[in-house]
Image (cartoon, rainbow, N blue to C red):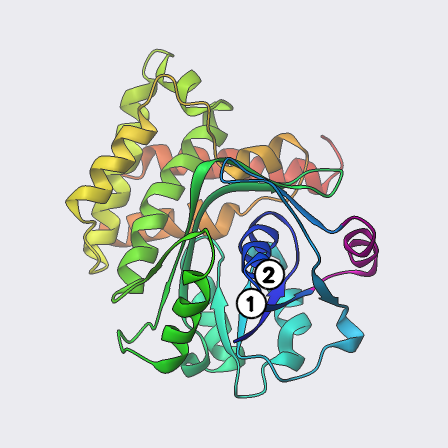
Amino acid sequence: MNILVLGAGGIGGYFGGRLAEARIDTTFLVRPRRREQIAREGLVIESPHGDARIEAKTVVAEELKPGYDAVLFTCKAYDLDSAMDAIAPAMDGRAVLVPMLNGIAHLERLDARFGAANVMGGVAQINATLRRDGVVVNGDKLHRIIFGERDKQATPRAQALADAFARTIVEWKLSPDIMQDMWEKVVFLSALAAGTCLFRGNVGEINSAPGGTEAMQRLLDANAKIATAEGFAPRAQPMEAFRERLTDRSGNWSASMLRDLEGGGQVEADHIVGFMLERARRHGIDDTVLSLAYTHLRTYEARRAAGRL
């Protein structure tokens, strides 16, 4: 299988790097500076599952041509338009797009641009970031990727991607119901992002503060009701895991959105928290904590846009 990976940052660099490490034909679409860095130093990964320095194939935008079987589409929601433009030359009718974005809202725009039949579903479950020195850092043992056809069909292209990941050290799953998996992720992620950004702390710090555990429980319960109203009631086992992770007093994790916010960067306020807030109001579900978090994030965005940070 011939795979194109959009970018070589945290998610793309990790999952694409593990594919390349396993001798899967993998090419990274990167900017010239990142290309030079990878050519000079290799694609470097630091992870509890083993460090790696990989000789990776790269391509820059003006060189991109058709001929790929799959495109791992890893970007932030606020870069969606430019990312679609970037990979468009590779989407020749043969390639399938496998989005690794957070949330659900991007699917409608990807379908409109490339056709629903050419867009699978995907979920990345990993704490990964690109360090300033260009090293891809996998921050804990979680390194799971889930993908599948949104119509629940078993297809040769989905199986080929599964066969590729089966050769890696990554934990992977070819899902028979990827939309259920995507909804379950947004139930968790929206609660994590809303809570950690609103309270400006990691999970352990929030749960050690008065009212913190109650607030995180309230977020999770509201999100579960939203998913249920949308036809994707979260399963018992994921919900148990979500609750444990969100209420762990020793938990040192937070959403990547908090890291972006504290670094003065762009945030996916509308795509993650705003999306769930709109659905809560549509279905008459308690939106108190989601609303506070969304107001906080949009206030930050306004201050950032005005240069007042």
Measured Cα–Cα span from mark 1 to mark 2: 5 Å
Q: Assess disc 1: are there few (<14), some (14-19) or many (≥20) residues with their C-alpha within 10 Å of its C-alpha.
A: some
State the residue at coordinates (33%, 80%): 155
Q: Name the image quarter holding residue 46.
A: top right
Magenta stretch: residue 308 in it?
no
The residue stretch that appears in magenta: 29-41
Q: Position of residue 247 (x, y in %)?
A: 31, 24
Asked if 96 appears above or below 242 in the picture, the reply is: below
State the residue at coordinates (51%, 33%): 296
- Secondary structure at badge 2 equals helix
Residue 285 in sight from this viewpoint: no
In the foreground, 232 or 61: 61
* Residue indicated by mark 1: 24
Q: Is residue 288 left or right of residue 103?
A: left
Q: Name the image quarter holding residue 208.
A: top left
Q: Amino acid at mark 2?
A: Ala
* Residue indicated by mark 2: 20
In the foreground, 228 or 34: 34
Q: Position of residue 302 (x, y in %)?
A: 64, 40
